[in-house]
Image (cartoon, rainbow, N blue to C red):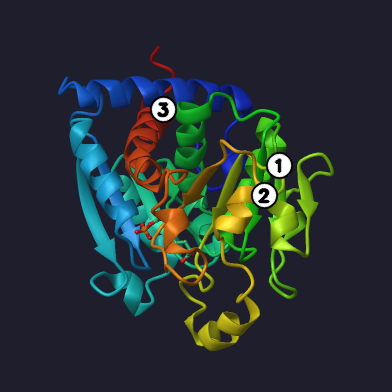
Amino acid sequence: MKHYLQFNDLSADEYTYLFERAALIKKKFKAYEKHHPLVDRTLAMIFEKASTRTRVSFEAGMYQLGGSVVHLTTGDSQLGRAEPIEDSAKVISRMVDLVMIRTYEQTKIESFAAHSRVPVINGLTNEFHPCQILADIFTFIEHRGSIQGKTVAWVGDGNNMANTWLQAAALLGFKVHVSTPRGYEVDEKLAGATAGSYQFFSDPLEACKGADLVTTDVWTSMGYEAENEERKKAFADWCVDAEMMAAAKPDALFMHCLPAHRGEEVEADVIDGPQSVVWDEAENRMHAQKALMEYLLLGRVA
Ligand code: CP
Ligand code: NVA
């Protein structure tokens, strides 16, 4: 049994399979062709933080695969009334085939997985967001081909998205230029950053130079709302604008996991401009996660 708690829970070889599989599953979806490998399988989705994309992509995706879903939140389950995570894992995993969790600390999802009889997927923690990077790399491949040897510029907070980009770069052989304000750096150790896959820049414009992809995320992630005003001041220069995009390669793409705050981490003319692929990126959450769910439950089918 495999869990998907961090990006490096799968190998480069498994990602090659998943990206090909996601492309096939997407093609079938676009052609209104039925693809029901998960009939009679149930996915439990546990949300301890808000979501739009993750909820819709997993729920619609699971139904499209022929399965069904159960949606739980902290507020409407015993999770919000201090039932131990270990007990919740033992009970829920006796009734469903797969679990997706969005929560706070990575240790929480690890405890759940340690007591689960079924595969567990990380739908975002404070530390990582592997499903998003899975979709982002799939989107890059669709537009530009292999990401190997390419350069991704990360402008902004050293958060769950940034940590996951670093893990992916070390595993799949590309480079991430990271620029964060002082005090908001990535956790290099947690992300397993290697010299060849990671370079820090104090100036965000420098980080964008020669990049194949420029990407950013909100200044304040979920769970850090109390720091919002302080962050607005610290991040003022970390707004992806036309000048930063001009410093990147002429055919560079722009991505953002969304939700976005135009005028904060990105200017409207960039996110709504011709280099932005954010809507493909959001849609691809569903296709990539369908491939992931199929793989975790059935293994390689092609
Ligand atoms: N990108 C992403 O995970 O979006 P949601 O918070 O809407 O799920
Ligand atoms: N870094 C953001 C991503 C939201 C999808 C957060 O954790 O809130």
Label 2, secondary structure: give it. helix
Q: Nearer the viewer, mark 2 or mark 1?
A: 2
> Amino acid under label 1?
Gly
Residue occupied by mark 3: 295
Q: Residue at x 38, y 62 (%)?
A: 259
Q: Residue at x 38, y 68 (%)?
A: 49
Depicted 138 relative to depicted 155: above or below:
above
Label 3, secondary structure: give it. helix
Residue 243 pos. (x, y %)? 61, 57
Residue 193 pos. (x, y %)? 76, 48
Q: Which one is earlier in the sequence, the residue at label 2 or at label 1?
A: 1
Give the spatial CA distance, label 2 vs label 3: 39 Å
Marker disc for residue 185 = none
Q: Is residue 181 left or right of residue 50?
A: right
Q: Residue at x 68, y 71 (%)?
A: 184
In the depicted view, which residue is nearer to us: 113 or 245?
Answer: 245
Residue occupied by mark 2: 247
Depicted 181 relative to depicted 45: above or below:
below
Q: Is residue 247 left or right of residue 113?
A: right
Residue occupied by mark 1: 210
Residue 142 pos. (x, y %)? 45, 27
In the depicted view, which residue is nearer to us: 249 or 185?
Answer: 249
Give the spatial CA distance, label 1 vs label 3: 35 Å
Label 2 CA crowd tier, 10 Å (few <14, some 14–19, many 20+):
some
Q: Quadrant of the C terminus?
A: top left
Hey, which residue is sitting farthest top in the picture?
302
Q: Residues at badges 2 and 1 in contact (C-beta under 8 Å)?
A: yes
The tally of labels here is 3
Q: Which one is earlier in the sequence, the residue at label 2 or at label 3?
A: 2
Label 1, secondary structure: give it. loop
